[in-house]
Image (spheres, rainbow, N blue to C red):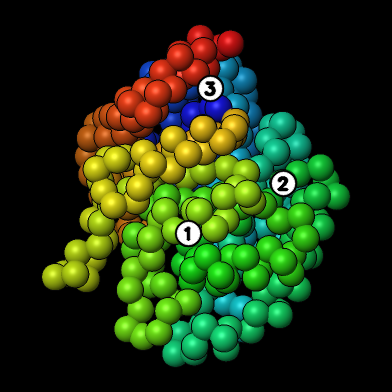
Amino acid sequence: MYLTGFADEAAASIDAQIRATRELGWRWIESRGIEGKNITDIDDAAFDAVCEKLATGGVGINCFGSAIANWGKKIDEPFDSSLAEARRAIPRMQRLGTKLVRIMSFAVLPGRGPDDQMAEERFRRLRELQRLFSDAGLTPVHENCMNYGGMGWPFTLRMLENVPGLKLVFDTGNPVFSDDRATPEPHPKQSAWEFYRHVREHIAYVHIKDGRWDEGTGKSVFTFPGEGVGDVARIVKDLLDTGYDGGFSMEPHLAVVYHDASITAPDQIRYANYVEYGRRFMKLVRSVGYGARLDAYLAGR
């Protein structure tokens, strides 16, 4: 077990991201944004500087939180941008010794049913991405987000059947805010536990997010881990009980909601929020009976 997180939710600069990680006693960052740009998109000079600062700070990048095939990419548009992102990511991952890269399965086509989502084209593209990364000795992990696989666990399983070798990063919070497209309309929100239970054997990595859906406002309400309806404690305990030894990556979405540039917070609150989120997750790990394992990780054993 190891702990990491989207440290761009603590700060935009790599210096402050490293500082927050060290304050928690952790050694890893899941890198997504640096000064507002994805790690695959910063220029070479900026990337060189990031590498130097990470080495000096004693912090590594365990996963690239890329935008490859994400909710901003449409399946009925050319594949070029996602392929280009993958080809930029590979040498950078190799330089940093990073083995995991987060990918998705393209945005859901609006106004079309779950069986009319160009699934075969999605699978074809994902197979190509899977080959690109695996040939380079790297592991792409698919996140259940606003994409084909995120429409419900049956869609994730169908995707895995059609993309051999693909693994999952399971996000505990995303089901809470996502319609269950495997059920008749009006679609209820998904159950995190049900989704997890069906895909557990394919999980290589975990995002920690929690919250609830406010029916009155039709908006997501994010919470600290264990305080929402994402079954975070139950899922974490079950993972550890069944031998999971991978990463838990924090994605708070509290002081800063990454996908909405209009929602911001003062820098100090943003930083403190991320650190507090990590501390509360460590408390949750202790509460489900794995304090000794956490202590061993923090001690570097």
Separation (CA) of disc 2 from disc 3: 20 Å
Q: Nearer the viewer, residue 262 or 251?
A: 251
Dividing the picture into quarters, in which one does residue 164 lie? bottom right
* Mark carried by residue 27: 3
**Quadrant where the C terminus is found in the figure:** top right
Amino acid type, label 2: Thr
Q: Position of residue 49 (x, y in %)?
A: 60, 30
**185 in relation to 255, above or below:** below
| Residue drawn 54% across the image and 58% down it | 198
* Mark carried by residue 118: none
Amino acid type, label 1: Phe
Q: Position of residue 220 (x, y in %)?
A: 26, 61
**Residue at mark 2:** 139
Disc 2 and disc 3 in contact, CB within 8 angstroms: no
Q: Nearer the viewer, residue 274 or 154?
A: 154
**179 in relation to 28, above or below:** below
| Residue drawn 62% across the image and 44% down it | 204
**138 in relation to 121, above or below:** above
- Characterize the local packing of mark 3: few (<14), some (14-19) or many (20 or more) Cα atoms within 10 angstroms: many
SS assignment at label 3: loop
Q: Is residue 292 left or right of residue 105?
A: left
Q: Nearer the viewer, mark 3 or mark 1?
A: 1
Amino acid type, label 3: Arg
**Residue at mark 1:** 195
Can residue 172 be seen at all in this image of the molecule? yes
Q: Is residue 75 left or right of residue 86?
A: left
Residue sitting at the far left: 216
SS assignment at label 2: strand
- Characterize the local packing of mark 1: few (<14), some (14-19) or many (20 or more) Cα atoms within 10 angstroms: many
